[in-house]
Image (cartoon, rainbow, N blue to C red):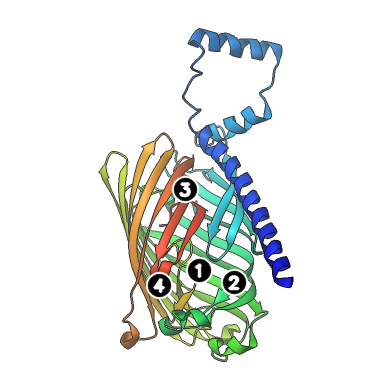
Amino acid sequence: MNCRRRTFALKIRYMARFRLFIAVFLVTICALWASAQDSIPALSQTPEQQVAENTDSTTLGKRPSIVQRFINYFAESNKTDKNKKFDISFIGGPSYTNSTSFAVGVMGSGLYRMSGCDAAMQPSNVTIYTTASVVGMVMVGVEGNNFFPDDRYRLNYDARFKYFPTKYWGVGYDECSVDDNETEMKTLMGKFDAEFLFRLVDGLYLGPRMAGMVLKAYDIDPEKMHLYHGQALKLHNFGVGVSLQYDSRDNVTNPHRGVYVNATQMFRPAFLGNDYAFSTTEITASAYQRLWKGGILAEQVKGTFNFGTPSWEMMATLGGSYVMRGYYEARYRDKHAVAAQVELRQHVWKRSGITVWGGAGSVFHDRTSFKQVLPNFGVGFRWEFKKNVNVRLDYGFGKGGQSGFVFNVNEAF
């Protein structure tokens, strides 16, 4: 009898989740359908009839319906308004990943130019977001790139707060590949990352960087505590360093051509109050080429290398929304990680496009343990929410049947 009750309760729970997903999905479809409305006249009306109707509506003071205003909002969201000093729009929609299950996110994307910036410069951008999932995950954050007049300085930042019931498999490829090592835990985390760059010559920037993280993990199975290798479950970390960056991209949020290379060296010494002292070297190189009309080829290689004694949370990881999409976020972790991905982005119709990608990555402790490679590939849908700001829905695949959706703003790289 108890088994039947549990089965019935599970059915009710999953039906409720499914209805929530369908409801939000329909709202998103309405937003996407709005992209087709910005240049298509009503088929049943002549241009003269449309003008007459608009004139009559204006004269009579009729306001459009809520549905029509909703459609108009998204139909106009990607059009630049030069009279606006700060142009921001919002969108919401569902997502699903192995790590969050069904989730609903709301994002706001803003474009602006600082006083004194030339109109030919790419605009600064900021994205604010909040996400909640059926497993209890809640996240709020803000990220952006601020360009100063004449592009002499750049401020790049990312800050977030996250409550996340998640899973953990251990450290190293061998531990992380054992399904029986899977253990559940809850984490409460706040983190930030910011850099201020000075232009040395055209396209080349150098400047200081700082990052901080506070995390508490709890509700962990006592029989799986050995997977944390005796390290603390309550962690805080603060680091300072320097970034060297070369950037010839035409746009940072949706590049069509150019090269981006970033080398960052971070130091997290004990005298700054860190629980675990170590340093991190991170190198990222990306390139973008136009292949044909509407076709962009993007490539990226990335490596993260830790020296010293990083905590289990500060290990280099694979998986998530940007690198090795489709893998459970941070399932694979170790002192070092490398990954490469190639993506073809094709504009299809009006504000819509599609992508396909393939890649591979690995985590390892030292050179002798660099022997296992994880494959990755997937497909995605793009919708231009604002000028050069895409909403992306990706579905990635990995080793052993791992897969998952990613819903986000801006390209993965």
Q: Position of residue 305 (x, y in %)?
A: 40, 78
The circle on residue 282 is: 4
For marks 3 and 4, give the one nearer the viewer: 4
For marks 4 and 2, give the one nearer the viewer: 2
For mark 2, what is the residue? 166
Tell me the quarter of the picture where residue 218 sits.
bottom right
Question: Which secondary structure, mark 4?
Answer: strand
Q: Is residue 341 visible?
A: no
Q: Give amino acid for label 2.
A: Thr
Query: In the rendered structure, are the residues bearing label 1 and label 2 in contact, judged by CB atoms less than 8 Å apart?
Result: yes
- Give the class, few, some or many, for how many residues have Cα within 10 Å of label 1's Cα (few <14, many ≥20): many
Question: Which secondary structure, mark 1?
Answer: loop
Return the disc, 1 or 3, that comes first in the chain's sequence.
3
Q: Give amino acid for label 3.
A: Pro
Q: Give amino acid for label 4.
A: Glu
The circle on residue 149 is: 3
Q: Give amino acid for label 1.
A: Glu
Q: Identify the residue shown where x is 63% and y is 68%.
A: 164
For mark 1, what is the residue? 329
Q: Identify the residue shown where x is 49% and y is 74%.
A: 331
In the displayed structure image, the side of residue 109 where residue 294 appears, left or right:
left
Return the disc, 3 or 2, that comes first in the chain's sequence.
3
Tell me the quarter of the picture where residue 138 sits.
bottom right
Return the disc, 3 or 4, that comes first in the chain's sequence.
3
- Give the class, few, some or many, for how many residues have Cα within 10 Å of label 2's Cα (few <14, many ≥20): many
Question: Which secondary structure, mark 2?
Answer: strand
